[in-house]
Amino acid sequence: MASLAQTAPTIDGTVSVSTTATQFDGSNFRLYAFNVVTDINFSEKFSIGFDLDQGRQSFDNGPTLNMSRVQIEPTWTFENDAYLGAYLQTASTNFSFASVTIDNVGIFGGYNQERWSVEAYLGQSSTEFSLPDRLEVRNAGLTFVASPTEKLEFFGHYARAEIKNSGGAGDITLSAIGTEYDFGNGIMSYASAGTFEFNIAGDSKATHMAIGGGAQLSEIGLEAPGMLTVELAKTDYGFGVEQTQVTVGWVIGIGNGNVTPLNGIARIARGGIRGPFIGGIGAFGVAGGFAG
């Protein structure tokens, strides 16, 4: 029994429940999201990550949008703190009258030190869109995180997708940076910014900025686990079109999991979602969804 207890898997993760009120071009809608990020640790060298994102968005006098994303990633860690893994990701968006599913597979590797870490990935995507010919999408991304002190952290992410078919080619790029500060009394704050660019049938670019903070519920007089978070965000699509968002969330850590918000651009800046199209639609799109 003692031997079995020592070899039993452990689970580290983060669970988030959030609601987002959004105003876009004179219209209002609301997103409800549930996000889970976990690592099942079978040993110090092998783990399997599992992500689950679910969102439901309601529009004023309009259709309902349902979003989901699932990812599984086995990871091998070496004695020098380098790691290597593979990922399988499926994201889907369903309107009352249409739906699309994107499958994304690839490999990743990185190096994790006490004060900094770096990770890169390569992958390929396919979609269930009905197209006249086969659409090839190749993804690549890079993430860097640095912690100069125990309370201060900087992070950034850049991803690019190359799209090819018989009619031509194009690309999508997603970039984001952010910083987080822990005040040490159960209070934290963060800020993030990013851009999402399409170069397919013409050029388009969206910019996004967000500020947020969180407080441990036990520190504000509530006998409850986890952290209450609030985020204010604004997206500029150009041509005078803007989107504003207010998100309130509840985040709980499991095991050694980080109590970090899973909604918004900060998750993208940490490299939390692979694939620039999936991450970009989640953080920048009117539907606002896969990143929770």
Image: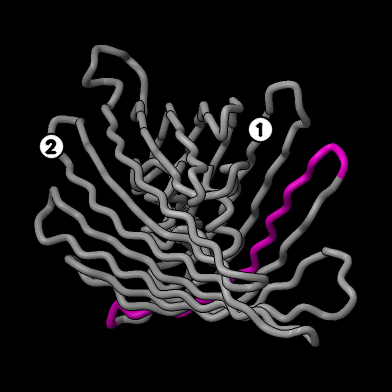
Per the image, the residue denoted by label 2 is: 183
Q: Which mark is residue 57?
A: 1
Amino acid under disc 2? Phe
Q: Nearer the viewer, residue 65 or 5?
A: 65
Q: Which residue is found at the position 76% from the left and 58% from the top?
A: 101
Asked if disc 2 and disc 1 are in contact, CB closer than 8 Å, the reply is no
Secondary structure of the residue carrying tag 2 is: loop
Residue 37 appears anywhere in the view? no
Residue 168 in the image: above or below residue 67? below
Lower sequence index among marks 2 and 1: 1
Residue 154, percent from left and from top = 22, 58
Q: In this image, 223 relative to 164: left or right? A: left
Query: Label 2: few (<14), some or many (≥20) within 10 Å?
Result: few
Q: Specify whether residue 265 is in view.
A: yes
Q: Residue at x 39, y 39 (%)?
A: 253
Placement of 102 over or under 53, stated as above or below: below
Query: Above or below — where is 104 with respect to 257?
Result: below
Seen in the picture, residue 174 relative to 281 is either above or below; the reply is below
How many angstroms separate mark 2 from mark 1 (CA)?
Answer: 34 Å
The answer to whether residue 257 is left or right of residue 237 is left
Q: What's the magenta region? A: 80-97
